[in-house]
Image (spheres, rainbow, N blue to C red):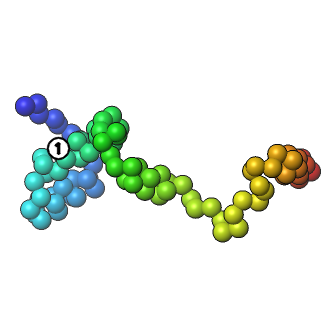
Amino acid sequence: MKTLNVRLGAEDERRIKALQRAGVVVSDLVRAAIRDEHDRRLGRASKRRPSEILDEIFAAVPEQDEEGPRVDATDRRAVRAHIRARATRRAE
């Protein structure tokens, strides 16, 4: 098994000591963090439940206002008029 040395700042060192006093095995904590980060970035994305993925997306994206859409997206003339009006306001 490979050993990994990590330099810690004063704040991280204080946190590690507090965790150790609380009975946390730091090596287990580091292993779990590495596995979680690996899975999040590189692996198991397809094995995650769709509801977990959607919850993550909804948490990252702010909710839309209560008014709903300002224009009917299925009406091309209404969309064109909406875009033209917004572009005109910005240009002024």
Residue 35 visible here: yes
Which of the pair 53/2 is nearer the observer?
A: 53
Residue 51 shown left or right of residue 88 in the figure: left
In which quadrant will I find the N terminus?
top left
Q: Residue at x 17, y 37 (%)?
A: 5
Residue 83 visible here: no
Q: Residue at x 25, y 53 (%)?
A: 12
Is 71 placed above or below 6 here?
Answer: below
Q: Position of residue 18 (x, y in %)?
A: 17, 62
Q: Residue at x 17, y 50 (%)?
A: 29
Q: Which quarter of the figure has residue 62?
A: bottom right
Q: Quick one: which residue is furthest to the front in this view?
A: 74
Mark 1, residues whose alpha carbon is within 10 Å: few (<14), some, or many (≥20)? few
Q: The disc labelled 1 sits on which kind of residue?
A: Arg
Which residue position holds label 1?
Answer: 31
Q: Quick one: which residue is furthest to the top in this view?
A: 2
Q: Residue at x 75, y 50 (%)?
A: 73
Q: Position of residue 41 (x, y in %)?
A: 35, 38
Which of the pair 39/24 is nearer the observer?
A: 39
Q: Position of residue 22 (x, y in %)?
A: 12, 65
Is 48 placed above or below 17 here?
Answer: above
Mark 1: which secondary structure? helix
